[in-house]
Amino acid sequence: MLKPSRSEKLFSTPLLRFNVPDAALLNAALLTEAEALRKADAGANKSNRGGWHSSGNIFDQEAPCFAEVADLARESVLEASRTIGAKADVAALKFKLFGWMNVNPPGGFNAPHTHPGAHWSGVYYVSQPEVEAGNSGMIEFLDPRSDLPNWRILKAPPFRLKKKIRPEAGQIVLFPSYLTHWVYPNDTKDERVTLAFNATFS
């Protein structure tokens, strides 16, 4: 019986999750700031459908909670870059961070989209309503490779066309910015609140 002499994973797309310890106070501060920003600004129209998307770079805000998330974002991006085997000294590269808040009320969702021009995109989960079943609030990633539908007959995980997850509050999800993703409608009575960001090296 033949066994492979070597097995490699080619052209894989990394998806990483980080747990932020003791996130309750940070999340409470972010929710307070989000409420104040929503009262002061109608927000921007991006991928949000029925929800609120903050205007400008959220990390330009003076509240300490945004600076804390910026530090977490930088740390997670650098660690992720090392984890995937980056040969460059990523800590020595110039680093641009741009962030925004999303608030999805009941029925709100985010349409499929990518983040052109960035390297890493991430989402910090501030508030994630609990559900017992269904797709409410889940983020789904779509396989960026073409010509794969014929592989479905094998039912092999490396060739699945979609991957969806429901992160918890206090988690960071990090992925390459070219990866198409979207968020299922919020079917609960509570708001789903996240802080998303793009990280770009130069």
Image (cartoon, helix red, strand yellow):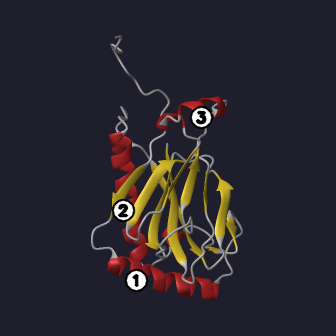
188 to 84, vertically: above or below: below
Work out whether residue 92 can be spotted. Answer: no
Mark 1 to mark 2: distance in Å? 16 Å
Circle 2 Cα neighbour tier, 10 Å, few/some/many (<14 / 14–19 / ≥20):
some
Q: In which quarter of the image is residue 191?
A: bottom right
Q: Position of residue 38 (x, y in %)?
A: 61, 83
Which residue is drawn at the image coordinates 63% and 32% (left, top)?
148
Residue occupying image coordinates x 38% and y 43%: 81
Query: Is residue 67 visible to the viewer in this orientation of the structure?
Result: yes
**In the rendered image, which residue does mark 3 sit on?**
152
Q: What residue would you read off at disc 1?
A: 28
Residue at image x 65%, y 82%? 41
Q: Position of residue 5 (x, y in %)?
A: 33, 13
Three-letter residue code for mark 3: Arg
Residue identifier under label 2: 72
- Name above or below for residue 179 compared with residue 4: below
Name the secondary structure under disc 1.
Answer: helix
Above or below, comparing residue 46 to residue 108 in the picture: above
- Badge 1: residue crowd in 10 Å (few <14, some 14–19, many ≥20): some
Under mark 1, the amino acid is Ala
Could you tell which of marks 1 and 2 lies nearer the N-terminus?
1
Front in this rendered view, residue 42 or 167? 167
